[in-house]
Amino acid sequence: MKVVKNLTVAAALLISAIAAANVNSAEFGKKVVAKYEVEKNLVKVNLDPVFVKKGQKVMMNLLNVSQGKVLLKVYDADKRLVFDEAIEGDIVVEKAFNFEKAFKGKYTIVVVDKFGTYTDEVVVR
């Protein structure tokens, strides 16, 4: 049993040494660019807000990795501000907008964060 353990440890050390030997000394310990497309896709995160509509309700969810200020605004068809809120310090920003008792027309939901401005439209009939 001890022989099997020793062989396993030796094999693990040998594999680690071979892997370390295959890295250029100039690259060792530095950040390197992904060599394969799969590696690039593994770390890609979509930071755009997600809008989910259910009837006259809209749920918005945003991953706010910077934890900076996020502005939420709703405008009516005449570009009048009908809702305004600023949220800061939350890593996940969630908001539900209920248009069930709103006047008929088109409304625009605007989300502004460090990375950009995003909009979604709702039509109340």
Image (spheres, rainbow, N blue to C red):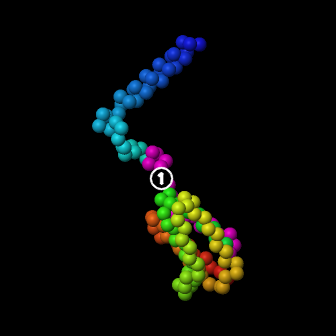
Task: Specify the quadrant of the image occupied by residue 123.
Answer: bottom right
Q: Secondary structure at mark 1?
A: loop
Outermost residue, bottom side: 78
Q: Position of residue 77 (x, y in %)?
A: 56, 85
Q: Residue at x 47, y 21 (%)?
A: 11
Outermost residue, front side: 89
Q: Is residue 116 shown to the viewer in this render?
A: yes
Q: Residue at x 50, y 55 (%)?
A: 45
Name the quadrant of the N terminus.
top right
* Magenta-highlighted residues: 38-56
Tell me, yes or no, whether the highlighted magenta stretch contains residue 13. no
Name the quadrant of the C terminus.
bottom right
Q: Is residue 88 above or below residue 85?
A: above
Q: Position of residue 90 (x, y in %)?
A: 55, 61
Tell me, yes or no, whether the highlighted magenta stretch contains residue 42. yes
Q: Residue at x 53, y 62 (%)?
A: 89
For residue 5, side relative to residue 16 (left or right): right
Outermost residue, left side: 26
Mark 1 surroundings: few (<14), some (14-19) or many (≥20) residues within 10 A: few
Q: Position of residue 54 (x, y in %)?
A: 68, 69
For residue 62, side relative to residue 31 (left or right): right
Q: How many marks?
A: 1
Foreground: 78 or 55?
Answer: 78
Q: Position of residue 34 (x, y in %)?
A: 40, 45
Q: Residue at x 35, y 41 (%)?
A: 30
Q: Which residue is mark 1?
A: 44
- Kind of residue sitting beneath label 1: Lys
Task: Specify the quadrant of the image occupied by residue 18.
Answer: top left
Q: Is residue 118 shown to the viewer in this render?
A: no
